[in-house]
């Protein structure tokens, strides 16, 4: 058995999806440029050591995505205008995070009150007295790209329930003069889609995902925002400025508003 066939056997992902993933990478990396004619079905069949029908299914996926175009009698070509699938640029600062979320309109799945508090780590601040759970799916051009599971401090939610129900919570928090932030951090991990996430994001079960855990702490040391966001992996791009450093934006009390003093639980560390 060849190394390629052994690699196929190590994955539970269907063969045609594995082949499509390799071809997609060739396009997105520039190995195949816009307008280039790609290898024939026969050539791809030999290269990947799979059946003709498998190659055809893989090519059909990329045609549906708009990455490839078939020209009768000429072959299959890379589309001249290919959509940047890695369009979600994960933010590495508060300012860029808020800017990236301003136009987001979440489609709420559920809003639950009286939920269990989040499990906090050592650097995640203290628990608020209670939380509201907001769950939503984010879309781009009718295509789902992330599922958001958020626990928001109840006293923060009550400041403007309508806005929190209809806009990205972090944008709403950033705009509120009553809230002063002391810390915000985000952790990224690689995961895989369970049946529910696969259904919501329209991907296969077990498909790779990027999972972000975000905690926002106010100036009283309360974890007012604890969110878990699951992204389709192919939509994500992470770019970091290795030399630039920008301090966390802290808002000052203004326009006559007073900072909100939240009630903390007596204990809340994991």
Image (tube, rainbow, N blue to C red):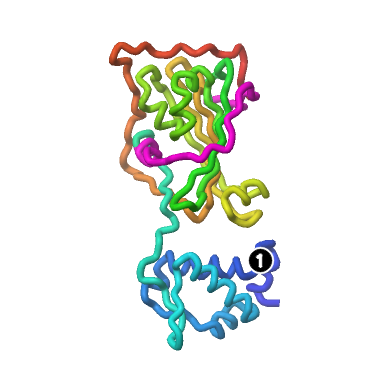
Q: Position of residue 250 (x, y in %)?
A: 34, 23
Residue in the foreground of this view, choosing between 10 and 236? 236
Residue 95 on the magenta span: no
Name above or below for residue 112 compared with residue 143. Answer: above
How many C-alpha atoms fall within 10 Å of the one at disc 1: few (<14), some, or many (≥20)? few
- Residue 243: which quarter of the image? top left
- Residue 172: which quarter of the image? top left
Residue at 44% x, 22% y: name it. Answer: 160
Q: Position of residue 127 (x, y in %)?
A: 57, 19
Residue at 43% x, 44% y: name it. Answer: 90
Q: Which residue is mark 1?
A: 14
- Asked if residue 58 lies left or right of residue 26, the reply is right
- Residue 91: which quarter of the image? top left
- Asked if residue 22 lies left or right of residue 66, the reply is right
Q: Which residues are magenta?
A: 96-123
Location of the N terminus (image quadrant):
bottom right
Q: Position of residue 51 (x, y in %)?
A: 65, 80
Name above or below for residue 67 compared with residue 87. Answer: below
């Amino acid at each position: 058995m060849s190394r390629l066939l052994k690699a196929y056997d190590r994955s539970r992902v269907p063969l045609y999806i594995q082949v499509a993933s390799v071809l997609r990478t060739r396009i997105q990396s520039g190995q195949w440029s816009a307008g280039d004619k790609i290898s024939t079905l026969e050539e791809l069949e030999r290269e990947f050591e799979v059946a003709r029908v498998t190659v055809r299914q893989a090519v059909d996926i990329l045609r549906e995505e708009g990455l490839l175009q078939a020209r009768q009698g000429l072959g299959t070509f890379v589309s001249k205008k290919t959509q940047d699938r890695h369009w979600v640029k994960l933010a590495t600062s508060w300012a860029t995070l808020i800017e990236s979320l301003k136009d987001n309109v979440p489609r709420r799945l559920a809003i639950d009150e009286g939920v269990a508090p989040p499990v906090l780590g050592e650097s995640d601040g203290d628990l608020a007295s209670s939380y509201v759970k907001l769950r939503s799916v984010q879309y781009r051009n009718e295509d789902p790209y992330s599922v958001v599971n958020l626990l928001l401090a109840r006293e923060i939610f009550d400041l403007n329930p309508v806005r929190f129900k209809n806009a990205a919570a972090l944008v709403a928090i950033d705009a509120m003069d009553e809230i002063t932030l002391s810390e915000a951090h985000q952790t990224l991990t690689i995961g895989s889609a369970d049946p529910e996430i696969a259904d919501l994001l329209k991907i296969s079960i077990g498909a790779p995902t990027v999972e972000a855990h975000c905690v926002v702490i106010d100036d009283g040391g309360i974890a007012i925002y604890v969110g878990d966001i699951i992204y389709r992996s192919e939509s994500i791009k992470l770019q970091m400025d290795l030399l630039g450093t920008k301090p966390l934006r802290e808002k000052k009390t203004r326009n006559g508003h007073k900072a909100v003093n939240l009630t903390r639980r007596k204990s809340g560390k994991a």
